[in-house]
Amino acid sequence: MYWDVVGIRSVAPRELAVQFEDGLSGVVCVDLSFCTGVFEPLRSDHLVGAAQINNGVVVWPNGLDLAPDTMYREIKRSQDRRYHLSA
């Protein structure tokens, strides 16, 4: 799908640059307020930076993942192409 993630890299603590299959790119910012419940392990800056791509989805070694369609939608409608994950 056009929202599949094809590129990812850590650009700052708690920030990941992502690129989608159709060429859209942006930055996902993982706020500490988001890191509760199942996402609590992402309180670690090191773990946030360890994100990888598996079948078009951003994943972490501990099995957490982010929905690519939501990231795509939020980045596309943001004027600064940033998606802030926060509570």
Image (cartoon, rainbow, N blue to C red):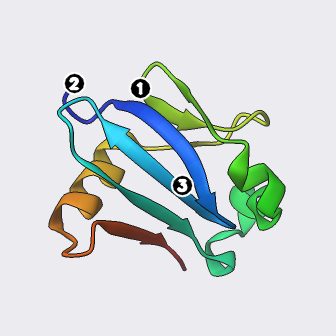
Q: Report whether 69 appears left or right of 85.
A: left
Check if mark 2's residue and mark 1's residue have beta carbons within 8 Å.
Answer: yes
Residue linked to disc 3: 16
Residue at x 70%, y 54% (from the top left corner): 48
Residue linked to disc 1: 56
Q: Nearer the viewer, residue 22 or 42?
A: 22
Estimate the spatial distance between the alpha carbons at disc 2 and disc 1, rounded to whole Å. 9 Å
Quarter-wise, where is residue 9 in the image?
top right
- Give how far across and how far down residue 83 sits, in percent: 38, 67
The kind of residue tagged 2 is Met
Estimate the spatial distance between the alpha carbons at disc 1 and disc 3, rounded to whole Å. 15 Å
The kind of residue tagged 3 is Leu
The kind of residue tagged 1 is Gly
The earlier-in-sequence mark between 2 and 1 is 2
Residue at x 35%, y 53% (from the top left corner): 71
- Give how far across and how far down residue 82 sits, in percent: 36, 69
Check if mark 2's residue and mark 3's residue have beta carbons within 8 Å.
Answer: no
The earlier-in-sequence mark between 2 and 3 is 2
Characterize the local packing of mark 1: few (<14), some (14-19) or many (20 or more) Cα atoms within 10 angstroms.
some
Residue linked to disc 2: 1
On screen, residue 9 above or below 87: above
Characterize the local packing of mark 2: few (<14), some (14-19) or many (20 or more) Cα atoms within 10 angstroms.
few
- Which secondary structure, mark 1? loop
- Which secondary structure, mark 2? loop
- Which secondary structure, mark 3? strand
Characterize the local packing of mark 3: few (<14), some (14-19) or many (20 or more) Cα atoms within 10 angstroms.
many
Q: Report whether 39 appears left or right of 8.
A: right
